[in-house]
Image (cartoon, rainbow, N blue to C red):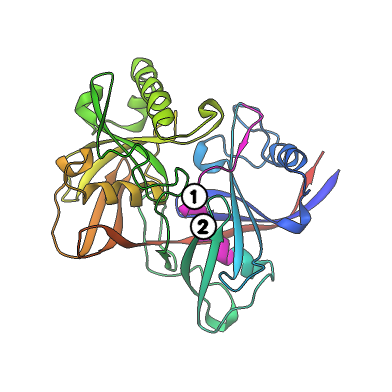
Amino acid sequence: MKTLPCWFMRGGTSRGPFFLAKDLPEEIAERDRLILSVMGSPDERQIDGLGGATTLTSKVGIISLAPDAEADINFLFAQVAINERRVDTTPNCGNMLAAAGPAALEAGLIAAQGDQTVLRIRTLNTNMIAEVTLQTPGGHPCYEGDVSIDGVPGTSAPVLQNFLDTEGSVCGALLPTGQLCDVIDGIRVTCIDNGMPVIIVAASDMGITGYETKDRLNADSALAARIENLRLKAGKLMGITDLANKSVPKISMVARAQSGGALCTRTFIPHTCHAAIGVLGAVTVATAAVMPGSVAHAVSQLSGGTEQRLSIEHPSGELTVYLHLNEDGSVAQAALMRTARLIMRGDVLVP
């Protein structure tokens, strides 16, 4: 069997192995076959690999030194299908991004800058650059701290993510259809991409309250059919091709907040209800929330001003997004806090 060095990391509410790009085949089809074997796909349990049989635990990170001065490291995210032979590198993943810096330090790809390390990380999926601040006392990644995030037990050291250029990450424009709202099959939607292509729809228009558990929503086959029909039609309007083989766009159903937040969400990624909400999906929903006339804005409770703190409620708690707005109300910058941890390091054996 082939041995492949890897660092098994949790990033935010996601998890998966990280590899050095130099250790993987350059040819994409060969690389993807290797990744599928590592993760144990296709198989609903991923019993013969490292995958955790959920969309949040069937992810891979690939890192390398950036060849230019704009970034310190390059990061390629791969969403690995569970029951299919498919590896999707179209979207970004802000959760796995939180683990890219620590993984690069663990692998010896880069050195710490002192007790705190600030890295510019380019996500190759969309050429997005984020400034990520890590705690590195003694020159090593620190995983112990008092920051908690919903969806992850316990507390850890903070990983601050400052997103610099997320607008139109996949679709090329913040509003890919050119409209703040579109009507598809009589349903009003906002199609938006500020780091993640998302179709935002009022939960009530989909026949739900927006407060259901993820298990209840995942068991609703009629809802699943409506969601997929909407996703395919909206995805075409957003200019996304080969929709059946892509994990974007996501669909986020929104309702008024229940626990004092800005709004409540139930997000499908794209066919399963997320246990929480993706980092860049949350940034995109928060961006829509501050845009008067959008579906998200209609159900949002906002504080006003150029510095906005939006608590995005989800099935397992909340995720807070910090937005800095321009004078015209557009989003200039988004930031949020995640945590990460090294779970295991060594060699994965590939048949």
**Lateral position of residue 325 relative to residue 154, left or right:** left
Q: Which residue is mark 1?
A: 93
The C terminus lies in which quarter of the figure? top right
In the rendered structure, does residue 85 fall within the stretch colored magenta?
yes
Q: Callout 2: helix, strand or loop?
A: helix
Q: Which residue is mark 2?
A: 97
The picture places residue 298, in percent across and down from the top left corner, at 15, 40
Measured Cα–Cα span from mark 2 to mark 1: 6 Å
**101 is higher (above) or lower (below) than 89:** below
User: Dot 2: few (<14), some (14–19), or many (≥20) neighbours within 10 Å?
Assistant: many
**Lateral position of residue 328 relative to residue 34, left or right:** left
**Residue type (three-letter) at the residue carrying disc 2:** Leu
**Residue 247 visible:** yes
**Residue 257 visible:** no
**257 is higher (above) or lower (below) than 165:** above
Between 121 and 259, the one lying in front of the other is 121
Q: Which residues are magenta?
A: 84-102
Residue at (55, 42) in percent of width and height:
90
Residue 221 falls in image quadrant: top left
Residue 181 falls in image quadrant: top left
In the rendered structure, does residue 179 fall within the stretch colored magenta?
no
Residue at (21, 49) in percent of width and height:
291
The picture places residue 97, in percent across and down from the top left corner, at 51, 57
Between 241 and 301, the one lying in front of the other is 241
